[in-house]
Image (spheres, rainbow, N blue to C red):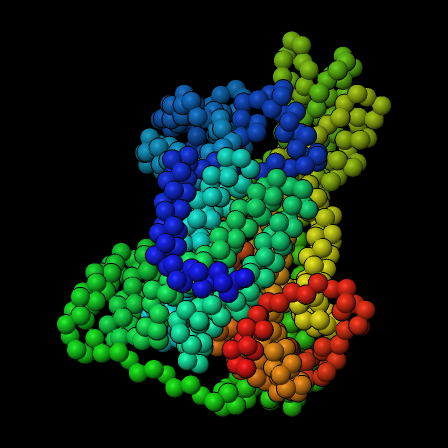
């Protein structure tokens, strides 16, 4: 059936291409017209910090649930200097008059505590009225705020917090695309063979992001969902199309017509693509098990992009193959030169080096001149195809098979060593001290640390309801206990929502330590488990501890409790699917163990760079910080799916050779040799695409891109090229053993369409 779909799309290529263009224009237009509703907030389940925010909003309102920031200023002569006090008071009053923000000035009665002891540093708190503000709106607010700031000699003004944290960063997607172009040209020596995977991936990504944007009006999705979707879509979309194009070219070399080649490519490699893409989608949707709104939105959004790239690979790609036909193997010099210039231009755009944009018109000139210049018009000679036994991959596999135990021990030792840092993994959110030192966000953070102490960058908010007069006495006792608690630098007295008839009270507590520190998290636990229960025992008060540090503690604890179930479901699914595909017990068991090794090693390297801070300044960070709690879940889901890509593509070829010859050693060597080039190219493309997102401004996106790039490289090198041939050599024919009763129970899943290949060869 899948082969017939490929043939139909090939034969009706104009109709299919027009249909895709129409759909892209339609969903793109609807998406643009509707706009997006991505959220920069995430809602937690029934945890204490979420209950605290609800109490704040119900009883105090006024930005309690919105975005916050701070405007920090320092002047050596003192913030009370008449010229400074007058100018800054007017500045804050102008901002407070805006409809989109509320500002508490250090010169107001409510902001009296916002001036340092030496009176040289002060800050104003800023609360946005809406919690649905986009990153672009943050940038507008920052620019407008900065444009009216007073200019006084000796006065330093810096802006901290989420609403002022936007800054320019390289275009990660463009850089990843540029490197993908270079890798594909080097690997396949054909401009068309390079262009078709990229064009197909673009079609799927555009449709996926447009659908995701429209769906954001129905399902809450975090603001970086589109970035994650593009990142994953570029990686898997190019890879899926690459697998199909590679098989198509092999079929042409065997003498098949373009239509026959497209049919067989879709019915063989296309099956693997459908299987691999489905596993990625299922693993992404597995994040729904975490029962957190923003992770649900992230999983659904990313799975839409993967689904659309998969659909484009089996429908749009065979239509495009019908257009280029056998010309896919012909490359003219002008095409290589023009493509190189385009890649250079994309690198320039990605790095914000506008001078390199001259490469784009140069590429057009080369194509035009190439139509007349015989030197550029002349096609390049086709690469000679080496006999299988003379390829580097074949010789490498045979060497591994002669030293299986040494290879296994070295591979496992390296992976285990890289995994060791994960034992010290600490989940949590970074604070503003993790920004580069030259950003205004980091400078504001440092000013607060110098003037007030590190804890002023992450105050805790305590809130409770009052139901009886005696609660007022207990509230005062809470104030006294907070001031005497170890780890507290400063605590405000109780602030009531209505001084005449109070029904709620809140306290602001400034820890001594930075928000991302272990000590700040321990203080939250101490307040919840010891200090507050002791003071409020026997009363009607139920004091909730909330704000940034409390959210980090609750979120990390909530996710950690659900990670085992998530891992069990994903790994169990991996085992069952591979067992059904390869009719084996040991092959899927080995795959699960190796997946754990590669994921563990990737986690370990993420801890080294992002938590320990080794080399963090090289990627635009100010130092180490806890690992975002969502990262292990998201990374595991994606790496599992990507590992299945390579597992299925490699082992299906090995199994095909084993079924044909019955010789396990030759099957492993032949299977590895036949797939090495495409797997290597696919892995390099994914690694560069994911790795380019290390340049993104968002720390979470940096971590995600780095983790995926490392995982893909480890999986495609140490796992596929070292551990797989070593273990398959040691296991021998036992690789393919399965009890007969179990074999009868398992559904048959054909991911390579061997019956078509055999019928054509027979």
Q: Position of residue 358 (x, y in %)?
A: 22, 60
User: 263 left or right of 351?
Assistant: right
Does residue 460 lie above or below 750 as drawn?
above
Quarter of the figure with residue 370:
bottom left
Q: Position of residue 396 (x, y in %)?
A: 56, 86
- Between 6 and 451, the one nearer to me in the picture: 6
Quarter of the figure with residue 320:
bottom left
Which residue reaches farthest right? 538
- Between 379 and 212, the one nearer to me in the picture: 379
The quarter of the rendered structure image containing the C terminus is bottom right
Does residue 599 lie above or below 186 as drawn?
above
Q: Position of residue 88 (x, y in %)?
A: 39, 27
Residue at horizontal 38%, vertical 26%?
Answer: 91
- Between 332 and 613, the one nearer to me in the picture: 332
Which residue reaches farthest top? 500
Residue at horizontal 41%, vertical 80%?
Answer: 255
Residue at horizontal 42%, vertical 59%?
Answer: 9
The quarter of the rendered structure image containing the N terminus is bottom right
Residue at horizontal 60%, vertical 82%?
Answer: 657
User: 438 left or right of 50?
Assistant: left
């Amino acid at each position: 059936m899948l082969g017939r779909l490929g043939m139909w799309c090939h034969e009706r290529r104009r109709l299919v291409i027009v249909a895709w263009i129409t759909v892209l224009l339609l969903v793109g237009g609807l998406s643009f017209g509707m706009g997006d509703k991505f959220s920069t907030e995430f809602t937690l389940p029934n945890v204490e910090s979420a209950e605290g925010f609800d109490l704040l909003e119900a009883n105090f309102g006024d930005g309690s649930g919105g975005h916050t920031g701070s405007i920090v200023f320092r002047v050596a002569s003192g913030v009370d200097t008449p010229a400074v006090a007058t100018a800054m008071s007017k500045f804050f009053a102008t901002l407070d008059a805006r409809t989109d923000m509320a500002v508490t000035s250090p010169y107001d009665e409510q902001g009296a505590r916002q001036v340092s002891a030496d009176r040289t540093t002060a800050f104003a708190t800023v609360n946005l009225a809406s919690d649905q503000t986009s990153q672009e709106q943050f940038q507008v607010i920052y620019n407008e705020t900065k444009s009216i700031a007073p200019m006084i000699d000796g006065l330093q003004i810096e802006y901290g917090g989420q609403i002022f944290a936007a800054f320019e960063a390289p275009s990660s997607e463009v850089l990843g695309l540029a490197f993908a172009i270079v890798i594909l040209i080097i690997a396949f020596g054909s401009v068309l063979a390079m262009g078709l995977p990229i064009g197909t991936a673009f079609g799927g990504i555009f449709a996926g992001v447009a659908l995701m944007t429209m769906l954001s009006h129905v399902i809450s999705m975090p603001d970086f969902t589109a970035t994650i979707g593009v990142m994953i879509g570029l990686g898997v979309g190019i890879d899926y199309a690459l697998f199909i194009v590679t098989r198509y070219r092999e079929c042409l070399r065997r003498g098949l017509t373009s239509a026959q080649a497209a049919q067989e490519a879709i019915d063989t490699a296309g099956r693997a693509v459908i299987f691999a893409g489905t596993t990625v989608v299922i693993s992404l949707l597995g994040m729904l098990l975490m029962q957190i709104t923003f992770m649900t939105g992230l999983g659904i959004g990313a799975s839409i992009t993967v689904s659309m790239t998969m659909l484009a690979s089996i429908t749009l790609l065979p239509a495009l193959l019908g257009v280029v036909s056998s010309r896919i193997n012909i490359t003219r010099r002008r095409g290589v030169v023009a493509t190189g210039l385009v890649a250079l231009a994309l690198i320039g755009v990605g790095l914000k080096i506008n001078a390199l944009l001259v490469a784009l018109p140069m590429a057009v000139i080369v194509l035009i001149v190439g139509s007349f210049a015989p030197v550029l018009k002349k096609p390049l000679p086709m690469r000679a195809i080496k006999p299988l036994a003379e390829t580097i991959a074949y010789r490498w596999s045979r060497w591994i098979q002669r030293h299986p135990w040494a290879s296994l021990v070295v591979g496992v030792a390296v992976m285990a060593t890289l995994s060791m840092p994960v034992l010290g993994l600490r989940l949590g959110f970074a604070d503003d001290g993790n920004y580069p030192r030259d950003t205004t966000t980091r400078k504001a953070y440092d000013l607060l640390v110098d003037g007030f102490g590190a804890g002023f960058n992450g105050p805790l908010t305590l809130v409770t309801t009052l139901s009886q007069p005696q609660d007022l006495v207990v509230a005062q006792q809470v104030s006294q206990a907070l001031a005497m608690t170890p780890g507290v630098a400063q605590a405000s007295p109780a602030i009531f929502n209505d001084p005449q008839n109070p029904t709620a009270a809140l306290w602001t507590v400034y820890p001594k330590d930075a928000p991302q520190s272990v000590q700040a998290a321990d203080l939250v636990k101490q307040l919840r488990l010891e200090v507050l229960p002791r003071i409020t025992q026997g009363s009607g008060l139920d004091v909730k501890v909330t704000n940034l540090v409390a959210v980090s503690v609750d979120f990390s604890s909530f996710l950690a409790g659900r990670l085992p179930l998530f891992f069990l479901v994903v790994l169990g699914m991996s085992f069952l699917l591979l067992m059904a595909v390869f009719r084996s017990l040991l092959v899927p068991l080995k795959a699960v163990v190796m997946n754990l090794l590669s994921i563990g090693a990737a986690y370990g390297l993420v801890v080294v760079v992002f938590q320990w801070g080794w080399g963090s300044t090289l990627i635009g960070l100010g130092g180490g910080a806890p690992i975002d709690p969502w990262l292990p879940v998201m990374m595991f889901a994606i790496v599992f799916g990507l590992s299945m890509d390579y597992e299925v593509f490699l082992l299906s070829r090995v199994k095909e050779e084993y079924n044909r010859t019955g010789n396990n050693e030759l099957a492993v060597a032949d299977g590895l040799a036949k797939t090495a080039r495409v797997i290597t190219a696919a892995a390099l493309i994914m690694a560069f695409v994911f790795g380019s997102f290390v340049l993104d401004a968002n720390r979470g996106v940096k971590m995600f891109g780095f983790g995926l790039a490392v995982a893909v490289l480890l999986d495609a090198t140490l796992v596929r090229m070292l551990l797989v041939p070593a273990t398959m050599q040691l296991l021998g024919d036992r690789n393919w053993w399965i009890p007969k009763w179990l074999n009868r129970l398992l559904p048959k899943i054909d991911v390579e369409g061997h019956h078509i290949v055999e019928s054509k060869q027979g």
